Image (cartoon, rainbow, N blue to C red):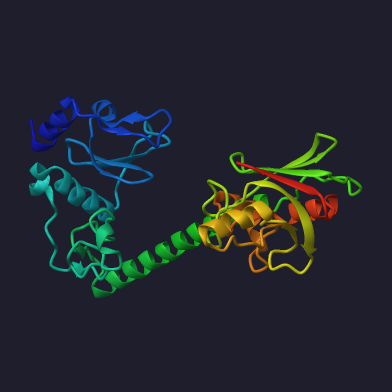
Amino acid sequence: MNVIEKVLEKYVSSDEADVIQITDPPLNLRDQAAVLKALPVFLDMGGCYALRPDSTIVSFSWDEPDEISIEEDQRIINMALCQGAKRYPELTDLLPKRPDDAQTCEFCDGSGLANDLPEHLRESIVCFCGGLGWIASAAGPLNARVVSDSYRTEKVKSFRLFAVGILIVVAGVLVWANWPADSLDEHVEADRVVISKSDQSLALLRNGQVLRMYPVSLGANPVGHKQREGDERTPEGIYVVDYRKPDSSFHRALHISYPNAEDIDRAARSGVDPGGLIMIHGLPNRAPFLGRLHRLVNWTDGCIAVTNKEMDQIWAAVDDGTAVEIRP
């Protein structure tokens, strides 16, 4: 029994779990190693490189773990052996010897740890040389430059694909965030607005019937009734819409009649300024593209915020003098 067989037997017989969770269903890597008779030496997001007792390096993807490929690229073979020796020190004697014509890896300057990575990632992300610190060069000094240029091309392609993927995700999120709200009859008139802070919702009512509900963002410190200027709380109580601002810094805004006489009296007894300028408003004029994303956090100074399209509907349906009830 050679050293690879011994390490493989020890790995397969271990009771410690080694399960790959990104597969569906999760893959027990020890069971897979027993079936393939190959020792896992290097794992990445795409799959696994494994070492057979005859020193052959094979690979399989997480998507198709039963489809085996035999690796013939010497750089990949060297990388697998190097990473295998780090994982299983018993395999150290299998590491390839540096040829006389090998080129020092310019990405790690011979250290085996890539130079262009943050310190906390250098141990977990394998350098182009596989961790050996050198690249075999059968074609003379220029070969390393060719390999190096090829690697840069691969990195650029990978980065571009990653960037395109990110842009697609961002575009999708922004489309969702700004997808038009369900329409509301332009002739609808609400006779009451009810805001529930615990539900983070605003309801337009007429004759006790709900016409439309809107999710809202509140003050950054939403729990409890507003006590003073700067506490970032949304008030609680019965108020009215007493004026509107078509030229608001937040698209459009309906002013709520806080503070009322009770609020002013309470603040006076505490010797504080009760604050004011509590509005139902849209999104900041500098960031209207946020759309529904604004709901992810309570971000106002005490106001009630909705998307701009929702604000347009509320603006049209709520007249000055309409009652506004803000519940805890």
Residue furthest out toward the right: 187
- Above or below for 318 versus 204: below
Location of residue 150 in the rendering, given as x and y in whole percent from the top left corner: 38, 66
Q: Residue drawn at (21%, 58%), measured in percent from left and top?
A: 131
Q: Residue 326's image quarter?
A: top right
Residue situated in front as seen by the camera: 61 or 170: 170
Q: Residue drawn at (36%, 64%), measured in percent from left and top?
A: 151
Residue situated in front as seen by the camera: 200 or 162: 200
Relative side of 15 to 216, left or right: left
Residue situated in front as seen by the camera: 136 or 180: 180
Relative side of 72 to 222, left or right: left
Q: Residue drawn at (20%, 70%), measured in percent from left and top?
A: 109
Residue furthest out toward the front: 269
Location of residue 313 in the rendering, given as x and y in whole percent from the top left corner: 80, 51
Location of residue 119 in the rendering, given as x and y in whole percent from the top left corner: 25, 63
Relative side of 131 to 307, left or right: left
| Viewport quadrant of the C terminus | top right
Residue furthest out toward the bottom: 141
| Viewport quadrant of the N terminus | top left
Location of residue 95 in the rendering, given as x and y in whole percent from the top left corner: 13, 51
Relative side of 166 to 44, left or right: right
